Structures are given as C-alpha cells and as structure tokens.
Amino acid sequence: MREPAEAAAPSSADPATGDGPTRRKPATTSERAAAAKKTVPAAKRAAAKKTTTAPKKATAAAKKTAAKKTTTAAKKATAEKAPAKTATKPRAARKPESRVAMVRRARRINRELAEVYPYAHPELDFRNSFELLVATVLSAQTTDLRVNQTTPALFAAYPTPEDMAAADPEALEELIRPTGFFRAKARSLLGLSVALRDRFDGEVPGRLEDLVTLPGVGRKTANVVLGNAFGVPGLTVDTHFGRLVRRFGWTAQEDPEKVEAEIAEIFPKSEWTMLSHRLIFHGRRVCHSRKPACGACPIAPLCPSYGEGETDAEKAKKLLKYEMGGKPGQRLRPPAGYPGEPAPPLGAG
Ligand code: SF4
C-alpha cells in the first residue's frame, strides 16, 4: 500500500518549461477549511448511508430468516400434531374430481399399495389348480385361515378330481365341517369333481366360460383360479375389494359384476390380478369393514374416506392385523418373502 505522502506527490513534469514536477500553490487556511467542510459532510453522509443501509439489510435478512424459521417450525408442529388430518382433507370437500384425476389417483394408490405389500398373494394354500378351485369354493362365508386349516386332511384323502368324485358324501362333509355350510359345500365339491372328471378329462379348465359351468363356481371363484393358477388376468371382487373401491371413490356400484366392469376401465389388464391381491390385503389388514385404521393407513393422503375409522395413530396401530400387527398370517404355507409368521394348524391356536 502507498503512503499518503507518496500518493499526494505530483507525477508529471511540465512539458512547456522543462521544469521538474509542477508544484501546486499551497492552499490558504480558508480554502482548506472550505475543503474540509465539503469533505466531512460527504464522508459523514457516506458513512451514515453505509451504516443505515447495512443494519437495514441485516434487519431484513434477520426478519426473513426468523419468518422462515417460524413458518417451518409452525408447519412442523402442525404436521406432528395432526399429520393425517392435514394431509387428508377429504377430496370431496376440496373440489369435484375429474375422471382423469380420479384415474391418476387410483393408479397412484395401486403403486403405493404395491410398495406396502410387495409380497401380496392369494391367501389360500394350494399346490395345483384343483386344490385352488376346491379351496376357493370352501372359502365362501368363512376365513381363508379356516380353509387352510381344513384342506390338508381333505387333499390327503382326495388328491384328484377322480378321488373326490368317488368320495362318500358323509365322509366328505365331515372333513370340511370346520368351514361351515358343509352340506352345501360338499354337494358343490362332489358336483364339480364329477364335472371335471366327465367333461374336462380330470383337468381344471383355463377359460372363464367353462369354469362358471361348474357347480358352486361363480365369476369370483373363476377369476381367482384363472389369475392364480393360469396367469390369466382377473379382478376378484370380494367383500374387501368392493368396500375399498367404493371408499376410494373409484366406483359407486354395489353389484360385483358392475364393480368389476368399472374397475376394469381404470387399470390395464396386466394389473388386475395383483391389484386384487393388494386391495384384499389392505382390506384385511388396515381398511377393515367396521373400524378402518385410518390413522395408520399408508395411503390416507390419497383416500377420500379418511376419517371413517380411527384417526388416532396409536389407537389405529392396535387395529392392524396379520403381519402388520405382528401376528401370524392366514396361510400355513406362506410363499417365500412373506414377512409374517405362518398360520397355526387346526386346533393349535
Ligand atoms: S383405512 Fe381409512 S384412510 Fe385408509 S383406505 Fe381405509 S378409509 Fe381410507
């Protein structure tokens, strides 16, 4: 840095005289005073401006940061206090949803359920299409767990359609008694086994139109068999499926066939079977018929029926079932990847 004296020294010679550096006449006292007077207010003004601007800037920045902090903290507090409520204001109350928006939301729910239940599967134990057909017929009006606890002895006694077609009706009734409605179910099993033996060479047919001609087999049973034993996409509109799609606002239909037709319009065929498993899984574990666990529901922000059930997170958590509630599942032989415990055999729990 240059010293002040050096800075004040003239730097050029006078070209006309050839003299050395030109010397200015020293200023008079009054000139100096005037200059000083001029300089001081300018400096003061500059300093004052700087001082005034800086605090102003600092105050504005501080205010901004504080406001940001307050807003973030408030947001956080609100979210912590009522996370689901904030996120799940009923959609119907916000504004009417267009068809396009509903389809987009429906597909998003399907994607999110796929992440929650990557292991979704049919909850009936079976080793082939005949066993799945019989187990599905038996599952009417009872739980899959009860069917799974009953079928090991049944399939040990009658492993093929031919064996079951030749069964003594009373012995068959006795074996399936734990599933309820055992007389009617025994009639269906005998009838469908005879039909398989006589009309389909002892094989379960892989077409819906053939399956529904079998005694005791409706569209729902046929779709379960097609989707899970033949890899043919199908929607399984059971009680859980119907309840959930209405709660999601995907349809208002009550009739299973109309529900199936409307849901088929929303999703590509390739999704039908797994969508059915995911909805049934969610209905059994979280979105129960009488008391849905809304406060513990992973898709609550997408559901217009949030609030139909328990919204308190702790209380809702206690309503979760099967592997989500830390309890055994329904299958005695669950597929690989199932994170829960297998179900106990009949009489063991
Ligand atoms: S549990 Fe509640 S929030 Fe979740 S899907 Fe069912 S109704 Fe909707």
Image: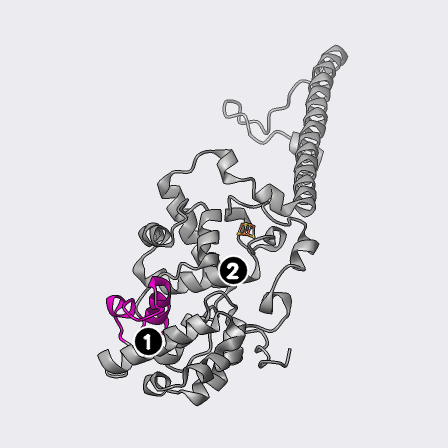
Residue at mark 2: C-beta within 8 A of ligand 1:
yes
Which residue is labeled 2 in the image? 282
**Image coords of residue 201 (percent x, y):** 23, 83
**Image coords of residue 150 (percent x, y):** 51, 79
| Residue drawn at (42%, 70%) of the image | 184
Where 93 sits versus 17, above or below? Answer: below
| Residue drawn at (37%, 81%) of the image | 128
Badge 1 crowding class, 10 Å Cα cut-off, few under 14, some 14 to 19, many 20 or more, is many
- Circle 1 or circle 2, nearest the eye: 1
Of mark 1 and mark 2, the one earlier in the sequence is: 1
**From the viewer's perspective, is 241 left or right of 161?**
right
**From the viewer's perspective, is 148 left or right of 84?**
left
**Image coords of residue 194 (percent x, y):** 30, 80
Query: Which amino acid type corresponds to the residue marked 1 in the rendered image?
Result: Leu
Q: Nearer the viewer, residue 237 or 334?
A: 237
Residue 224 within the magenta-colored segment of the rendering: yes
Q: Which of 102 and 56 is in front in this view?
A: 102
Query: Which amino acid type corresponds to the residue marked 2 in the rendered image?
Result: His
Bounds of the magenta segment: 205-231
Where 291 sits versus 216, above or below? Answer: above
SS for dot 1: helix
Q: Nearer the viewer, residue 35 or 73?
A: 73
Q: Can residue 126 be seen in this view?
A: yes
Which residue is labeled 1 in the image? 192
**From the viewer's perspective, is 80 left or right of 122?**
right
Q: Is residue 200 visible?
A: no
Which quadrant would the N terminus be assigned to in this image? top right
**Image coords of residue 266 (percent x, y):** 34, 51
